[in-house]
Amino acid sequence: MKIGPYQLVNNLVLAPMAGVTDRPFRQLCRRMGAGMAVSEMVSSNAVLWSNDKTLLKMNHQGEVEPIVIQIAGAEPEQLAQAARFNEARGAQIIDINMGCPAKKVCNKAAGSALMRNEILVKQILQAVVGAVKIPVTLKMRTGWDQENRNALAIAQMAQDIGIQSLAIHGRTRECGFAGLAEYDTIRAIKRAVDIPVFANGDIDSPEKAAQVLDYTQADGLLIGRAAQGRPWIFREISHYLATGLRREPPTLEEINSILLEHIQNLYEFYGEYKGVRVARKHIAWYSKCQPDGANFRGRVNQAETCEAQIGMVSEYFNQLMTMEGVEAA
């Protein structure tokens, strides 16, 4: 699997997710088997590039290449400028966001709202591809709503303009994240273009990953929500695709170790105050399917310091391991 000059170690990619795919999470998922990880979307509005929040989104120090920065906006020249700015800061691939269904994004005619205006899409793709020397990729949905599925037409246009890979979420903007993802459009796009196509949507297990690849014939997969609290899903899928067998799930001891390392990296990245708060949602995801998880989350969300949060996580998992040992005996 190659995107431009970059050879990926496999065809599994961490999908961009606002408020989730920060540098600590991207680095973790790469260590857990993702072949590539995409940043949170960065606004094309230059006014925002100097604020702390946006600077953190563009921070990719110490990451394994390729460094992929996703940009969002609705003005061709602004997006071109954002692409050039991030290329100068070390981005190796620029990804254009045409898939976000959030109202605050779509209300600005950005994200998946762009799919309503194919003329503007063409102008944006031409502007961004022409602005940089590095590969440009595109993430989109199947269309704006059920009656307006135009992803196939946009995919063919994108290939002609010079987009070097496509990621398709198998839902329209109107669907949001509701219902089941449909893969027929992804299959049709794969048959119509020669550039790599990544399937996205509802890929939450090794078996589902294999089924989606087989049905769509996509070149790779984007994994998003299924990696929240389960970053090891990448190694599980990779193992299954290679062997046809399920890999042993992580032990409680390993989950505890992964989580503690993750939240400590969040503290270092954001500082204590924000790090503790960002860590809360990750702790919730890791503990979602564990015994007494709801009560634990209620308690740990009250922690205000790194020390308190780490202590509560360690205590909780130690209790789970003790319970597991008693049951095994």
Image: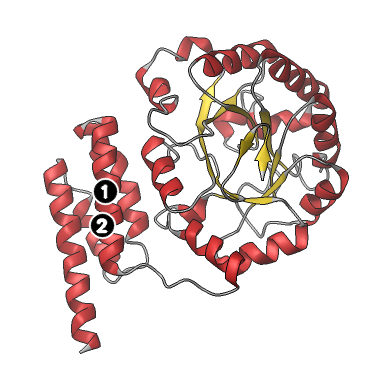
Q: Residue under circle 2? A: 257
Q: Is residue 220 above or below residue 140?
A: below
Contact between marks 1 and 2 (CB within 8 A): the answer is yes
Q: Residue under circle 1? A: 261
SS label for mark 2: helix
Q: Is residue 162 above or below residue 89?
A: below
Residue positioned 20% across, 90% down in the render: 329
Q: Residues within 10 Å of mark 2 (few under 14, many from 20)?
A: few
The answer to which quarter of the image holds residue 251 is bottom left
Residue positioned 60% across, 69% down in the render: 207
Percent across and percent down for residue 98 are 67, 33
Amino acid type of the residue tagged 1 in the rendering? Glu
Percent across and percent down for residue 248 are 42, 73
The answer to which quarter of the image holds residue 99 is top right
Q: Nearer the viewer, residue 294 or 33?
A: 33
Q: Is residue 161 left or right of residue 241?
A: right
Percent across and percent down for residue 250 are 36, 67
Q: Nearer the viewer, residue 156 or 145?
A: 156
Q: Do we see residue 153 in this rendering? A: yes
Residue positioned 53% across, 24% down in the render: 91
Q: Alpha-carbon distance for marks 1 and 2? A: 6 Å
Residue positioned 49% across, 21% down in the render: 90
Q: Is residue 319 left or right of residue 199?
A: left
